[in-house]
Amino acid sequence: MTTQAPSQGEMLDLYAVMVRIRRFELKMVEIFTTRIKNGDSPGALHTYCGEEAVAAGVCSLLRRDDYVFSTHRGHGHALAKGADLRKVVAELNGRATGLSRGFGGSMHLYDPSIGFMGTTGVVGGNLPLCLGTAYASVAMGKDSVTVAFFGEGAASQGSFHESLNMAAVMHWPIVYVCENNLYAATTHVSVNCPVANVADRAQGYGIPGVVADGNDVLAVRDAAAAAIERARAGFGPTLIECKTYRHHPHCMVIPEHRPPKEIREWRARDPIELFGLKLVAEGVATRADLDDIEAREVRALENAVESMAESPLPDPLAVADFLWA
Ligand SMILES: Cc1ncc(C[n+]2csc(CCOP(=O)(O)OP(=O)(O)O)c2C)c(N)n1
């Protein structure tokens, strides 16, 4: 397998995508907090802060005609796959200009035009679905690859095992990306996973299982490169486990339960800061270049929030557009 080192432009893109996701999530926390204070109920918000290197690293290698199946923690996957920032901001705020016309929200973001096959509120629910696009690619003679992101909690659902087994026996082009952030809501991975690594479970299906540092975007990219190449060439699925950690509690309504020391230690390994330091140390970018990227992303986000605020709510009767006749 050949893994091409990213060019300077690709490195800066990786940085920009991670910053875009981080800024987006922090802004949504701000907006949702205000809305809750105002007696509004904007729904659940599962942020991806701390895990950006996974989505950025994997999606940087995908083509538009490759497919991504996401989770309840999926804003980062959508943005990394190329979803329009304005439409994602609008969708999370229930506006008619949103990705799902304002009817879906955080856990129902879809954009099939870029191969983004959706976030979902059903933990492990995306894993059987990803078999569909993989089968379709094979049946149509296309070399598109399907990526399924999921948490380590989902890896203890029956759907995980069914999906891996099917993909393995059929040699379907799927890259399974487990985002092991140590906790499924409040349950530590050691409670529901009896082996050291989720990736070890790949052995049971005769496919490669790889552990990657999920806070190192280049390590994620390397692991993904080999898996994508393998899948595209017709050799079947790979299970990648990215060890990472979320900055925020599980969602807006569940209080923090994790040990403060553990949170501090992981936050000290912030994927964006680590990558920024590396870019500067290796002369790929100056601190001023990185600040420019940050400023550009902040501007784009501010514009998206402004346009969302001016966008209408969906017409309730338009829901009929989604019903079968
Ligand atoms: C089938 C199902 N069971 C339970 C839940 C409630 N639930 C929502 S998120 C979550 C934790 C999922 O953990 P993990 O898969 O590790 O993803 P993470 O939240 O850590 O990203 C649970 C149990 C659900 N949404 N769907």
Image: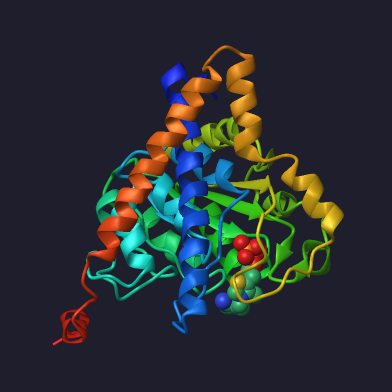
Residue 51 shows in the view: yes
* Above-or-below relation of 54 to 47: above
Seen at 62% across and 76% down, the residue is 253
Residue 319: x and y in percent read 21, 83
Residue farthest toward the left in the current orientation of the protein = 325
Q: In which quarter of the image is residue 195?
A: bottom right
Q: Quadrant of the C terminus?
A: bottom left
Residue 115 shows in the view: no
**Left or right: where does residue 287 sit relative to residue 139?**
right
Q: In which quarter of the image is residue 297?
A: top left
Which is more toward the observer, 82 or 19?
A: 19
Seen at 23% across and 70% down, the residue is 96
Seen at 47% across and 84% down, the residue is 39
Residue 260: x and y in percent read 83, 58
* Above-or-below relation of 249 to 199: below
Q: In which quarter of the image is residue 153?
A: bottom right
Seen at 35% across and 73% down, the residue is 104
Residue 280: x and y in percent read 59, 18
Where in the image, quadrant-wise, is ligand 1 located?
A: bottom right
**Left or right: where does residue 65 sit relative to residue 78?**
left
Which is more toward the observer, 67 or 218?
A: 218
Which is more toward the observer, 196 or 251?
A: 251
